[in-house]
Image: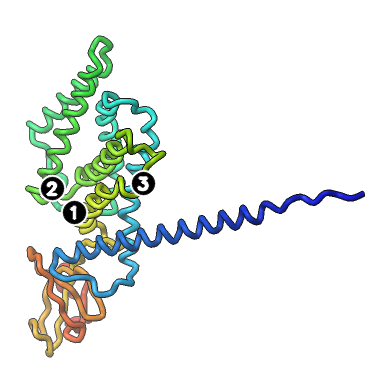
Amino acid sequence: MATSAQPATSSPQLSTIVDISSKGVAALAIALYASGFLIVSLHHSRYGFTETNPFRPKILAAGAWFFLFTGIPVVTIVAVKKNLLNWMKVGEFLFPYFIGCVGLSFSASLLFNLSSNSINPLTWRSLVLSIVMVGILVFVRNYRKCPRWVSALVSVLFVIYAVESTISDMLINHNFGYNAVTLWFFGIGFLALVELMVPERDLTNLTWANPAAPILVSLVVFALFYYPHVKPSLGGGSPINVVLYFNKDSVIKPNQNVSVQLVDESDAGFYIVGQGETRAICVPRNSVSLVYFSDKPSDSTLLR
């Protein structure tokens, strides 16, 4: 008895999936490299030099960290967007979202080299004001006769106060601590929320040109304020404390050693900065006899 042949549809479908997946992976790799290259270039420009080798794992690592720290708040906002039907609900949402960012920053901060004075005791004025604002917010959110706009207003005022304090601490006191990481997660999430709340920018008709400006601004901010604090062991741009031992042919301090910060290294040499300096010096490799990874000379008998 003759049997009818089944159409072979699985093979075309599989080839389509493989084709889309390969293009997606290629696009992601290009985006990671482009972002990482720009981040590393902006970071090095602060020290007066540019990256000489464009094919380094450090560039992909910089792009990967940017994508990770940007993707977490964006995915969170996309997930909760359906519950934020109007700007009143957005205002009420800002306070719990900020508290969530505070909790997330404690674990994410393990990836950064925090400032030595990043955990300063709060002043009595800041502490009392924070407690009062939190108490008012909890009260108005649970008191049924209180208008909803009051709850939203208090939530917005608390977030404005917290964000302003963090920005002042970073820019004026040059302090990088847990609150700086909190500010990143909150700021990226807020930008994503604004983009999605604008009617003509919903997910159904979103094009690459719509979020181009926020993405570029976020990338520059990450390169200038956050990437320099990512631990070097994780591919970040935080300088490493080293002691360079110069040989007798060195132009700088022949037969001496000096404690410096290592910004980067290449085939040309070591890019170093002194304590409190902002411009790097490229020391040729043939001028250095030994590199000791510490902030002070070694007492080892091997170096005596």
Residue 3 visible? The answer is: yes
Crowding around mark 3 (Cα neighbors within 10 Å: few <14, some 14 to 19, many 20+) is few
Secondary structure beneath label 2: helix
Of 6 and 153, nearer the camera is: 6
Q: Residue at x 12, y 74 (%)?
A: 281
Spatial separation of the CA atoms under disc 1 and disc 3? 28 Å
Identify the image quadrant of the C terminus. Answer: bottom left
Left or right of 154 on screen, residue 3: right
Q: Earlier in the sequence, mark 2 or mark 1?
A: 2
Spatial separation of the CA atoms under disc 2 and disc 3? 34 Å
Q: Nearer the viewer, mark 2 or mark 3?
A: 3
The label on residue 163 is: none
Spatial separation of the CA atoms under disc 2 and disc 1? 9 Å
The amino acid marked with disc number 2 is: Met
Q: Identify the residue position indicated by label 3 in the image.
A: 207
Q: Residue at x 25, y 35 (%)?
A: 98
Q: Position of residue 115 (x, y in %)?
A: 16, 52
Above or below for 129 versus 265: above
Q: Are the residues at dot 1 and dot 3 in contact (C-beta closer than 8 Å)? A: no
Q: Identify the residue position indicated by label 1 in the image.
A: 225
Q: Are the residues at dot 2 and dot 1 in contact (C-beta closer than 8 Å)? A: yes
Q: Position of residue 222 (x, y in %)?
A: 23, 53
Q: Residue at x 10, y 68 (%)?
A: 279
Of 3 and 258, nearer the camera is: 3
Residue 272, quarter of picture: bottom left
